[in-house]
Amino acid sequence: HRADRRSPLFRDLDGPCFVARSPAVDLGPEPAEALAYETLGPKELFLSFAGQHAAEHPLHRALAALGPGSALELVPSGQGLALRCPGGEIVARLSAEAARTWLPRLGHVAEVRTLGLFVRRREDGQEPEFADRLLADRWELPLCEVAYRAR
C-alpha cells in the first residue's frame, strides 16, 4: 500500500505478506501529488494470453520472477498494449477495452509496478473462442498499479 493513500482494492488486507514501498520514480520538478494511480486487474487484461503459450515458454519464467514492486513497461503491441518486463519479455496483454483507455494516456505513464500475481487455470471458464488455443494448464497474470500524470 502507499503511505499517503490506501487502495480501495486492498482496504481490508494487512499483514507481513504485503510490501510497503516508497515511490521509485524520479518526478523531476513536478510534485508527487501530480500523479494519479490506477490498478490493472483481471478486467483490464486478456486473461488467456499467457495460457496460449506452452508451460516452457520464457514468459512463464518472466512471470514467476515478478514480485511486489517489480517494474513493468506498458508498451504498444500489435493493435493494442502489452506489459513488458525490463528484460524485454511480454508477460501480459491488455484487453481491447483497456487498450482503448490507456493508448491516449501512454505518454503520461510514469511507471507500472506489480502489486501481485493471480493464477488462472484451464478449467477457469475460458471463452469458447480462446479455450481451444490454450497450451498451458495453469498460468499467472500480473496485478499492476499504473502511476501516470493526470492532465
Image (cartoon, rainbow, N blue to C red):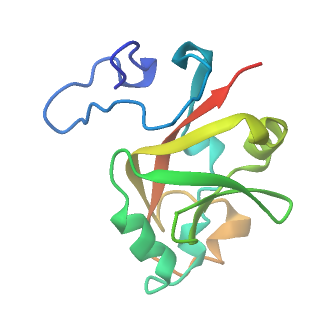
Write down the quadrant of residue 21 in the picture. top left
Tell me: residue 146, above or below residue 57.
above
Q: Nearer the viewer, residue 66 or 45?
A: 66
Counting labels gives 0
Q: Residue furthest front?
A: 29
Tell me: residue 131, above or below residue 46.
below
Q: Where residue 105 appears, x then y in whole percent?
A: 78, 35
The answer, for residue 4, to whether it is visible in the render is yes
Q: Residue at x 48, y 58 (%)?
A: 124
Tell me: residue 94, above or below residue 18.
below
Q: Nearer the viewer, residue 74 or 134?
A: 74
Side (left or right) of 106 relative to 55:
right
Q: Where residue 78 appears, x then y in whole percent?
A: 83, 66
Q: Nearer the viewer, residue 129 or 118?
A: 118
Q: Where residue 4 appears, x then y in whole percent?
A: 38, 12
Q: Where residue 29 appears, x then y in whole percent?
A: 61, 22
Q: Residue at x 15, y 29 (%)?
A: 15
Q: Quadrant of the C terminus?
A: top right
Q: Residue at x 44, y 70 (%)?
A: 62
Side (left or right) of 116 relative to 39:
left
Q: Quadrant of the N terminus?
A: top left
Q: Residue at x 71, y 56 (%)?
A: 75
The answer, for residue 102, to whether it is visible in the render is no
